[in-house]
Image (tube, rainbow, N blue to C red):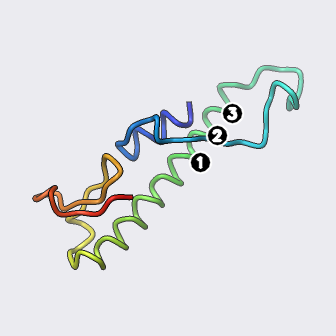
Amino acid sequence: MLAQILAERLKMDINQIHVRMKVDTETTPEHWKSVGSRGTFMAGRATLNAADDVINQLKEVASCVLRVPKEDLEVANSRVFLRDNPSIGLHF
């Protein structure tokens, strides 16, 4: 689920996303109740916040390299590129 959330936010192929978590509720449950929806909500929000931070950092670096305002950049398909000219950009 987290890979799907991240792939959608970064507009990239889900097969390029690998989620690794130390907690496995199957072997180390929090308690006796099922809390999947709460866990998905909390981890999902954290994933979205992290993705927004990644997008911001990618745009900041790319704006320096490409010498364009970061507002003119888009992130998709494992690239940061000029919104008006997608052929100009960087892979990540």
In the figure, is residue 92 to the left or right of 43?
left
The residue under label 3 is 39
Residue 60: numbered disc: none
Quick one: SS at disc 2?
A: helix
Quick one: SS at disc 3?
A: helix
In the rendered image, residue 50, in percent from the top left (x then y), is placed at 53, 54
Q: Which picture quadrant has residue 22?
A: top right
In the rendered image, residue 23, in percent from the top left (x then y), is placed at 79, 39
In the rendered image, residue 65, in percent from the top left (x then y), is placed at 29, 77
Q: Residues within 10 Å of mark 3 (few under 14, many from 20)?
A: few
Quick one: SS at disc 1?
A: helix
Give me the C-alpha separation between circle 1 and circle 3: 11 Å
Q: Residue at x 88, y 31 (%)?
A: 28
Give me the C-alpha separation between circle 2 and circle 1: 6 Å
Kind of residue at badge 2: Met
In the figure, is residue 13 to the left or right of 68?
right
Q: Which picture quadrant has residue 52?
A: bottom left
Residue 42: numbered disc: 2
Kind of residue at badge 1: Ala
Which quarter of the rendered picture does the C terminus lie within?
A: bottom left
Asked if labels 1 and 2 touch by Cβ distance under 8 angstroms, the answer is yes
74 up-or-down from 7: above or below: below
Q: Residue at x 29, y 63 (%)?
A: 90
The residue under label 1 is 46
Q: Residues within 10 Å of mark 1 (few under 14, many from 20)?
A: few
